[in-house]
Image (tube, coloured by chain):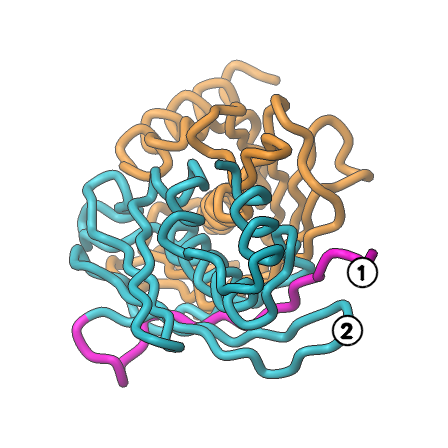
Amino acid sequence: MTPSEILRSAAAAGVKPDLAQLIAAIPYACYLGITVDRKGTEVTTVLKFQPHLVGNVGLQALHGGVVGGFLETTAMMQVIFEVGAAEMPKPVDINIDYLRSGRAVDTYGRAVITKQGRRVVNVHAEAWQEEHDRPIAALHGHFLLPAEK
Amino acid sequence: MTAASNEAVDFVNMMLRSIPHADALGMTLVEIGDGSAVAKIAYAEHLIGNPDTGVVHGGVITSLLDNTAGLAVQARLQSLGGIATLDLRIDYMKPAVAGEDIYAFVECYRATSSIAFVRGVAYHTDRADPIAAVAGAFMLGTNTVRKPVN
């Protein structure tokens, strides 16, 4: 199933979409190696370290674009999970703060919806590695919801 | 382009091949100026963010803009010294077109002794009709000795 089919069938059934199935339907998320770990209402994204994610060989640091793409995906999953849109939300703008260099280990992400409007959702997401209180990057951004029909 | 600038483009492309993620995305440098760079990523199926439309994921655009911005900073400094992205703001103006290559033009318009500022766009064919715009700041001198800045 495509992401839209997954979202529409969940919306029609009145249930939360299966985020693991959804992420598996996004080629770029699979290419980066992103998975979703859902425990009740808590959604955590996981970026498994792989050599092709490195942006600086000397430092063995993750590429800034990988961290950005991971955080954007994390924010998007939270919007889909909480708002339950029947189409994929569209990013309007994102701000990424790079706080520490991302090392050659697994990375985790979580997002919080700061404000949900009728058409636009404001989201804050954070990525961390071994220590949750030492984030490697943070994102805040706006996502546009599909127009109500 | 002059022979000298062709040489610079070849050199940077060789360097890009040694950055695993830039290589994985098939990123190539097209043009390099005194404080600017144009790079591209060819359309590929594994870069798709929405299979319903075939449009590439925003993360691909983030990678391209971040890397091109880094090259623009290094071009302005005339140095391969260590730099680190402090922040990026990306505005998505319109969806990318499925099947089309994506280009980024980024200029480093100001650099102090410790910080460089960049702005740029991602586009298909026309810089005046961008897919996305970027603004950001880079920290300089993060892992090696750097030549003084003008």
Q: Foreground mark, 2 or 1?
A: 1
* Residue topped by disc 1: A148
Amino acid marked by disc 1: Glu
Q: Is residue B110 visible?
A: no
Percent position of residue A73, x then y: 46, 56
Q: Which residues are magenta?
A: A130-149
View extreme (front): residue:
A13
Left/right placement of residue A77 relative to residue B129 reads left
Up/down of A24 relative to A103, above or below = above
* Residue topped by disc 2: A118
Amino acid marked by disc 2: Arg
Which residue is pictured at 68% across the width and 48% down the height? B132
Q: CA distance from mark 2 to mark 1?
A: 9 Å
Is A136 magenta? The answer is yes
Chain letter, disc 2 residue: A
Which residue is pictured at 20% across the width and 51% down the height? A49
